Image: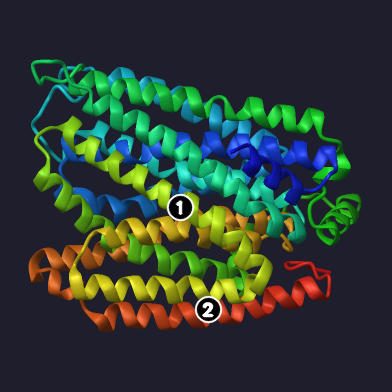
Amino acid sequence: MVQLARSIMAAIGSDRYERLKFILLCGAFFLVIGSYTLIKELRDSIFVAIVGREYVPLARILETIILIPAIFFYSFLVDRLRRYQLLYVYAFFYGIIGFICASILGHQVIGLQNTDTSAHRYFGWFFYFFVEGFAPFVVSLFWAFANSVNSPETAKKNYAWMVSGSKIGGMLSASFAWWLLGWQLKDGSRMFSDVVNHQILLCFFSGMVMLIPIVIYFLIKKVPGKYLHGYEAVYQFEKEHEKKEEEGVGMLAGLSMLVKQPYVFGIFGMLFFYEMINTILGYHRLGVIESASSSVSDFSFRLFEQAFILHLIGFFISLIGTRTLLRLVGEEVCLLLIPLVTGGLLWYFILSSNIIVYVLVKSFNYAFAQPVRESLYIPTVKEIKFKSKSWIDAFGAKLARGSGSGINMVTTFMGSAAVLSGGLFGSIIILWTLTAFLLGRRYTKAITNNEVIGQVD
């Protein structure tokens, strides 16, 4: 372990401030993914226990609409707050609401003590949509911040290590939840009730997420400003435009960039295709776990068991494969590998119906596809990094999940054979591969020519 730490530090470089920036970003990402691991799995178990699994596809569809006002509010804040201040706001918001939700879980009627599932139990819906906002407004926001303070060269060297650190956070959170939910007394009964187990985990989530602003605060205070410029061409462009006009151009700027810029739409496509496949596989995974579970705690226990395995696999992918492939073949080839590897895993799923494919696809996305995809934002202007990215990660991802959920709702009546269709998955992979090819060429051209994508003269 000591030798690994030395290897990482050597790869980063000898500059003390670059090292400090890397360590603090790793620490923040550790907390982001550690907290997200807890809340993401609790979302499914709590929603299924309160509302019912049959309403998951509908929730996936509704979240697309519910989050649109939140995106407008986020865009409003982007024009008025600094990058790190946005993280402060959203981290504290999720921490405080998390503590409130933990308290509500103990209510006899609203919370988990009421075992009658119903579509009219509105706290379950609120909790589901609350959790769904965490990825675009905390995880995505962290990546936007990281992309704004790193250059393409540092991203290629350090993003894989940063993801490895986040996987450790995910493994520790998942293993803690796994241990807590499986803790039994000598007579075979659980140490805590279903309610208390989930309240403890929600409180741990809130505590972790509220530590994120503290780490970012130290980063801003201890690392000199010149190390936080990121891609120099973008920094100089935005600095020049700040002198000429107001930085913000409205809450619809991000959506406008998404529609007008083929490069940004390509990033949208990369996420859309993944999320559609992930939703189809994830719904079937929930069915398998629910049928094997005897209680809410047992359901959550099995979810966190899979989450631990997911982060463990992701840790080794990011540690061994991501940085090596980025260094040897570059972003252009790595982008092509994302749909091709996913396509291979889907072919295995079609032949075997083995739900372990869900874990492998998700591990590959978090450890390899996400850092490669996120590095695409580095040569873009702030409007794209923050506003367009929020539309992609919130509305775009939810639109993809809604599409996948529509397919899941159809298979509820037609059977799983419709999902196991090679034609469906094959069409997605072909379009995904074409998108990756064109996007990789554009990224390489921009970096080679020192371009700023999204620049409007």
Residue type marked 2: Thr
Image spot of residue 324 (x, y percent): 62, 63
- Residue at image position (10%, 29%) is 115
Image spot of residue 217 (x, y percent): 71, 28
How many discs mark residues in the rendered view? Answer: 2
Q: In the picture provided, is 354 more to the left or to the right than 219?
A: left
Q: Nearer the viewer, residue 18 or 278?
A: 18
Residue carrying label 1: 314
Residue carrying label 2: 435
Q: Nearer the viewer, residue 243 or 172?
A: 172
Tell me, yes or no, if residue 41 can be seen here: yes
Does dot 2 land on a helix, a strand or a loop? Answer: helix
Residue type marked 1: Gly
- Residue at image position (56%, 67%) is 267
Mark 2 or mark 1: whose residue is earlier in sequence? 1
Position of 239 relative to 301 (above/below): below
Q: Nearer the viewer, residue 398 or 449?
A: 449
Quadrant location, the N terminus: top right
